[in-house]
Image (spheres, rainbow, N blue to C red):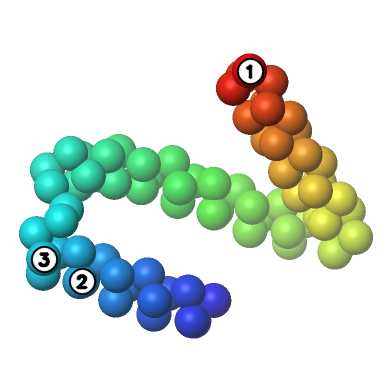
Amino acid sequence: QAFNLTILTAMLVSSFAHDLIGHEFLVSAALALPAALVGVWLGHRTYLWLDDRRFDRIVLVLLMLSGISLIWFNH
């Protein structure tokens, strides 16, 4: 996680420095941030409530449903 944070932060700073990030991106990021934080909070609460095995199964089922929906709606 630390590696990803470092690389993504460096990419964001580099993109800002080269003026590759515009107003639309900032608006989209501002709109997405609250939903992302709610998702993180719900995931953390769920993880504390469930044991590791059940949490893993729930995450795998959600990933499978997400993949199926991507295939279904893109055809």
x and y, in percent, of residue 53 in the image? 90, 60
x and y, in percent, of residue 72 in the image? 69, 21
The residue closer to the viewer here, 40 or 45, is: 40
| C-beta proximity under 8 Å, tags 1 and 3 | no
Q: Which residue is mark 3?
A: 18
* Residue type beneath disc 1: His
In the rendered view, tell whether residue 3 sits above or below residue 48: below
Q: Which image quadrant: the C terminus?
A: top right
Which sits earlier in the primary sequence, circle 2 or circle 3? 2
User: In this orientation, does residue 44 appear?
Assistant: yes
Could you say whether the residue bearing mark 1 is in a helix, strand or loop? Answer: loop
Could you say whether the residue bearing mark 3 is in a helix, strand or loop? Answer: loop
x and y, in percent, of residue 67 in the image? 70, 36
Numbered mark located on residue 13 in the image:
2
* Residue type beneath disc 2: Val
Q: Which residue is mark 1?
A: 75
Structural distance between the alpha carbons of marks 2 and 3: 9 Å
Could you say whether the residue bearing mark 2 is in a helix, strand or loop? Answer: helix
x and y, in percent, of residue 29 in the image? 29, 46
Residue 18 in the figure: left or right of residue 29? left
Q: Residue at x 39, y 80 (%)?
A: 6
Label 3 neighbourhood size at 10 Å, few (<14), some (14-19), many (20+)? few
Label 1 neighbourhood size at 10 Å, few (<14), some (14-19), many (20+)? few
> Where is residue 73, by image quadrant?
top right
Q: Residue at x 48, y 81 (%)?
A: 3
* Residue type beneath disc 3: His
In the rendered view, tell whether residue 66 sits above or below residue 43: above
